[in-house]
Amino acid sequence: MQYDSLVKKILKRESVSGEVNIVFVDDKKIRELNKKYRHKDKATDVLSFEMNEEGIVGDIAISTETTKANAKKYGVTYEVEVRRLIIHGVLHLLGYDHGKEMRNAEKICQKF
């Protein structure tokens, strides 16, 4: 699965340059990360980690297990759900918080 093009289009839209690393993990690992960094002892679908290194925007962790469950729940393919999570994760790296502004940006980015 290749997501570089999607990430680059989102970054370009926001006039940001740099790399975004995407890692796919299981629910156990994302739960560990969520507990360590957000103090929430539960699995989640996506986590974003801003980096303060030159040329690196940040890292995104996506749970394959939760993504598969969400895809089934929402009646979409796994690929569609992964794209949604990448968009969501990148927007968090760029400073978006949940809310109307995030939803509007997500809608625009879904067209990429």
Image (spheres, rainbow, N blue to C red):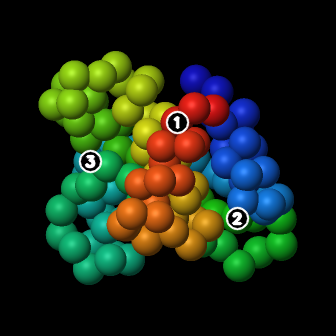
Q: Is residue 106 visible?
A: yes
| Image x and y of residue 75, in percent | 22, 22
Q: In the picture provided, is 97 more to the left or to the right than 15?
A: left
Q: Earlier in the sequence, mark 1 or mark 2?
A: 2
Q: Earlier in the sequence, mark 1 or mark 3?
A: 3
Binning the other alpha carbons within 10 Å of mark 2 as few (below 14), some (14 to 19) or many (20 upward) gives many
Between the C-alphas of marks 2 and 3, the distance is 24 Å
Q: Amino acid at mark 1?
A: Gln
2 and 3 marks in contact (CB < 8 Å): no
Residue sitting nearer the eye, 55 or 30: 55
Mark number, residue 110:
1
Residue in the image at 27% along x and 29% along y: 71
Please tell me whether mark 3 sits on a helix, a strand or a loop: helix
1 and 3 marks in contact (CB < 8 Å): no
**Residue 100 position (above or below residue 66):** below
| Image x and y of residue 5, in percent | 72, 34
Residue at the spot of label 3? 27
Residue in the image at 38% along x and 77% along y: 37
Q: Amino acid at mark 3?
A: Asp
Please tell me whether mark 2 sits on a helix, a strand or a loop: strand
Residue in the image at 66% along x and 73% along y: 51
Residue in the image at 55% along x and 59% along y: 91
Q: Earlier in the sequence, mark 2 or mark 3?
A: 3
Q: Judge depth for marks 2 and 3 and give the one in front.
A: 2
Binning the other alpha carbons within 10 Å of mark 3 as few (below 14), some (14 to 19) or many (20 upward) gives some
Q: In what quadrant of the picture does the C terminus appear?
A: top right
Q: Judge depth for marks 1 and 2 and give the one in front.
A: 1
In which quarter of the view is residue 1 placed?
top right
| Image x and y of residue 53, in percent | 77, 75
Between the C-alphas of marks 1 and 2, the distance is 20 Å
Residue at the spot of label 2? 57
